Image (cartoon, coloured by chain):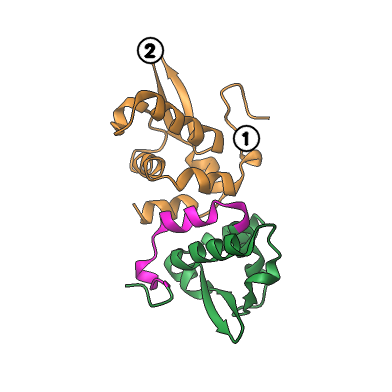
Chain colours: A green, B orange
Amino acid sequence: MPDEDGHPSPEEMDLRTVLSALSDPLRYGIVAALLREPEGAARTCASFNLPVSKSTTTHHFKILREAGLVRQVDRGNSRAATLRRAELDRRFPGLLDLVGANP
Amino acid sequence: MPDEDGHPSPEEMDLRTVLSALSDPLRYGIVAALLREPEGAARTCASFNLPVSKSTTTHHFKILREAGLVRQVDRGNSRAATLRRAELDRRFPGLLDLVGANP
């Protein structure tokens, strides 16, 4: 069962769901940007300056979260996202390397 | 430039386009099934018995072809598809291995 914030465990992650999450250019760009951050870095959703409304931004992060790509953490007034890099590398070896090599 | 049948060269393949092609369950299943065939094996579109109309089947194969995942070859009265395995393994190392490991 995903946790209360909708984060699946690595065993619950589904490759097709992950690929579907990555198939959107904005979401792919978020993951590629997080890959360029130091491991474990958290960025607020607003920091990505996506060219869409706040509610659409929230929607994209929900899809990334439910696929298992990012973990959302509360930061007082805002929420920030970290890439679940180590878990993804174990569950889907090579996938994030491909994204990193194809920014 | 893709060739006259819409096949991109490996350099023209785009990871996001490939991920988008794979994000559909039927298309993912076609690629996973071709991965289980001997290298270079060609299967007709009809052989996949997809639960959709012939024109929808054609549409799915067009998306796979234009992403670079399959190569379509004429077989007299019908068309068959082969997985562009070696080219994909070079262009996106590890991607097909992930699909093979997550059927």
Looking at the rendered structure, the number of numbered marks drawn on it comes to 2
Q: Quadrant of the N terminus of chain B?
A: top right
Residue A36: x %, y % from top left: 68, 69
Residue B2: x %, y % from top left: 63, 29
Marks 1 and 2 close (CB-CB < 8 Å): no
The residue lying toward the viewer, choosing from B67 and B56, is: B56
- Circle 2 residue: B77
Q: Which residues are magenta?
A: A6-26
Q: Residue at x 39, y 65 (%)?
A: A13
Residue A83, by quadrant, is: bottom right
The residue lying toward the viewer, choosing from A51 and A21, is: A51
Give the distance between the C-alpha atoms of the residues marked 1 and 2, in whole angstroms. 26 Å
Is residue B80 rendered to the left or right of residue A103? left
The residue lying toward the viewer, choosing from B94 and A50, is: A50
Q: Amino acid at mark 2?
A: Asn
Q: Residue at x 45, y 48 (%)?
A: B23
Q: Residue at x 53, y 72 (%)?
A: A85
Residue B33: x %, y % from top left: 34, 41
Residue A15: x %, y % from top left: 42, 57
**Looking at the magenta stretch, what is its main secondary structure?**
helix
Q: Examine the rendered structure and indicate whether residue A51 appears above or below residue A83.
A: above
Q: Residue at x 57, y 75 (%)?
A: A82
The residue lying toward the viewer, choosing from B58 and B95, is: B58
- Circle 1 residue: B9
Q: Which structural element holds mark 2?
A: loop
